[in-house]
Image (cartoon, grey):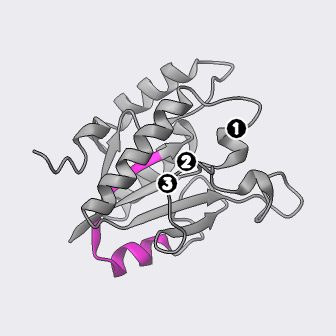
């Protein structure tokens, strides 16, 4: 059994939209480091794109739907897939692809913390996967109720233990140790 990296919704319309994600450059750098370490560890990389209905700003193929150009993915070898719900599993073949690759543990990063990160972590556990959540590898925007930093801290605390193993990104695939 193996592990895989799942990158969620690092798309132009979310990453570079009118509301900028909290610490977006740092999070992008963190995810790119995880991509590099996943490749070194021969861990498969899955990349989810949130896809809106035809005519929406994030409809398939639209400029805002595209994966952020500075994300170091390789479309020829990484597994890009589209989703329409907060769960990366609902209506996709992600579960089947992970099982076919004999993946039992997912490292989950990306956006948005309180929607797609939270939902995918919980559903992955229900499906029998172990989940590693780099506490510094996901982000969101400020909300009317809470600043993004508080949303992220809250979800890191809420998900840890019951749903995920919370770690620092630097400790994932740290092959030097």
Residue 129 in view here: no
Q: Which residue is mark 2?
A: 116
Is residue 103 one of those drawn in magenta? yes
Q: Secondary structure at mark 2?
A: helix
Q: Earlier in the sequence, mark 3 or mark 2?
A: 3
Question: Measuring 55% from the left and 68% from the top, which residue is drawn there?
Answer: 80
Q: Secondary structure at mark 1?
A: loop
Position in image of residue 16 (x %, y %) = 70, 38
| Residue 151 against residue 34 in the figure, above or below | above
- In the picture, the quarter occupied by the C terminus is top left
Position in image of residue 117 (x %, y %) = 49, 45
Disc 1 crowd, CA 10 A, few/some/many (<14, 14-19, 20+)? some
Label 3 and label 2: CA atoms lie apart by: 21 Å
Looking at this rendering, what residue extends furthest in the bottom direction? 100
Label 2 and label 1: CA atoms lie apart by: 18 Å
| Tag nearer the camera, 3 or 2 | 3
- For residue 90, the mark is none
Specify the quadrant of the image occupied by residue 59: bottom right
| Tag nearer the camera, 2 or 1 | 1
Q: Which residue is mark 1?
A: 16
Q: Which residue is mark 3?
A: 72
Disc 2 crowd, CA 10 A, few/some/many (<14, 14-19, 20+)? many
- Give the magenta range: 94-109
């Amino acid at each position: 059994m193996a592990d895989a990296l799942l990158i969620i919704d690092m798309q132009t319309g979310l990453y570079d939209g009118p509301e900028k994600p909290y610490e977006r450059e740092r999070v992008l750098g963190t995810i790119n480091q995880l991509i590099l370490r996943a490749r070194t560890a021969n861990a498969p990389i899955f990349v989810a794109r949130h896809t809106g209905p035809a005519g929406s700003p994030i409809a398939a193929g639209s400029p805002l739907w595209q994966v952020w150009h500075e994300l170091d993915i390789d479309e020829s070898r990484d597994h890009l897939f589209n989703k329409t719900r907060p769960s990366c599993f609902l209506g996709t073949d992600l579960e089947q692809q992970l099982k076919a690759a004999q993946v039992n543990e997912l490292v989950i990063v990306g956006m948005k913390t309180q929607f797609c990160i939270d939902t995918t972590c919980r559903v992955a556990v229900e499906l029998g996967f172990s989940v590693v959540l780099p506490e510094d590898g996901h982000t969101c925007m400020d909300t009317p109720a809470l600043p993004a930093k508080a949303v992220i801290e809250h979800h890191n605390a809420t998900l840890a233990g019951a749903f995920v193993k919370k770690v620092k990104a630097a400790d994932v695939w740290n092959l030097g140790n």
